[in-house]
Amino acid sequence: MPNESINIQALTAEAVGHFNEGRLAEAAVAAEKIVGADPQNIFGNYILGQNHLGHGEFQRAKACLEKAITAQPDFIEGHIALGHVYQANDQKGAAQASFEKALSLDPNSLDALVNLGKLFNDGKQWAAALSYLERALSLEGELPEAQFELGECLREMDREEEAIIAYKRSVMLDPFQAKAHHRLGELLKDHRYHNQALNSLEEAARLNPEDLDIARDLAVVLGIAGRQEEALHYTGFASQFVEMYAEGESDFTLVGHKRGGIELSAEDDDPPRVYKNWR
């Protein structure tokens, strides 16, 4: 029986308010009080489960979410959160079952549709992923994650022009996705839209300056654009070599590079000399 000396309704309102505003630590404190008074409380266990999931405590998250679902079997958000726990533990079959249960409770659940699309993308089941993602986007087109996953799916299905459109929509809706900018830049480069590719890859590098793959692709497009000094900088970073500066005023041309090294030649040297920098 719930502890009637504690105002569970007020605590629930407090916990849900904190949770909806992204204040997970404060929400968890209130949720602990709720489940202390009422161990089967749906919202208390759900919020604690989400908090444990965010901290990588998957078994504790699973236990809390299962309590919430047991108390209310048609709790869609609980099934979706449990699916995320299984995903984090690489239990793809259990994750799929949780998302499909949520979808059976609400065939228009955007969370369930997008998560199933992502799950099938991860499993390289492109046709199934495409079906779920298109269903989600037919209900709500302004979903940046769904547009990104659609781009991933279409790219793998060799429908690259359509993938470009999906990636563009994704970054328009959420411009802070380094991975989406990178994917877009890669395809634009491959299709020789070099100026657009440069813009996308520069933004990807700004958002994630430590990513070596972004740096490598950006170096190529900078070289095509004639920005050789910047291209060499990113080539060097991507190759993880120790940068050093040559003496004199000569411009340098990239001769070749590989993982761990770079070769440069001074344009004004006759015969040309090659400067190597190996790590």
Image (tube, rainbow, N blue to C red):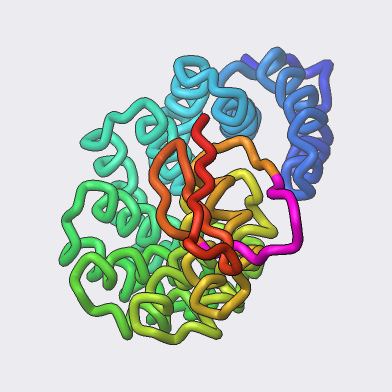
Residue at (39%, 60%) from the top-left corner?
114
The answer to whether one can see residue 51 in this image is yes
Residue 130 on image: x %, y %: 25, 69
The answer to whether residue 250 is above or below residue 196 is: above
Identify the main secondary structure in magenta: loop
Which stretch is magenta?
245-253
Is residue 14 positioned above or below 115 on the image? above
Quarter of the image where the N terminus is located: top right
At which x and y percent is residue 55? 61, 24
Point 55% across, 28% down: residue: 53
Image location of residue 49, percent across then percent down = 56, 27
Location of residue 96 (image quadrant): top left
Q: Is residue 218 visible?
A: no
Residue 39, picture quadrant: top right
Q: Is residue 146 left or right of residue 154?
A: right
| Residue with the most extreme front position | 270
Q: Residue at x 52, y 54 (%)?
A: 264
Question: 82 or 231: which is nearer to us?
Answer: 231
- Work out whether residue 121 or residue 161 is closer to the camera in this orientation and state it: 161
- Asked whether, in this view, residue 251 is left or right of residue 166, the answer is right
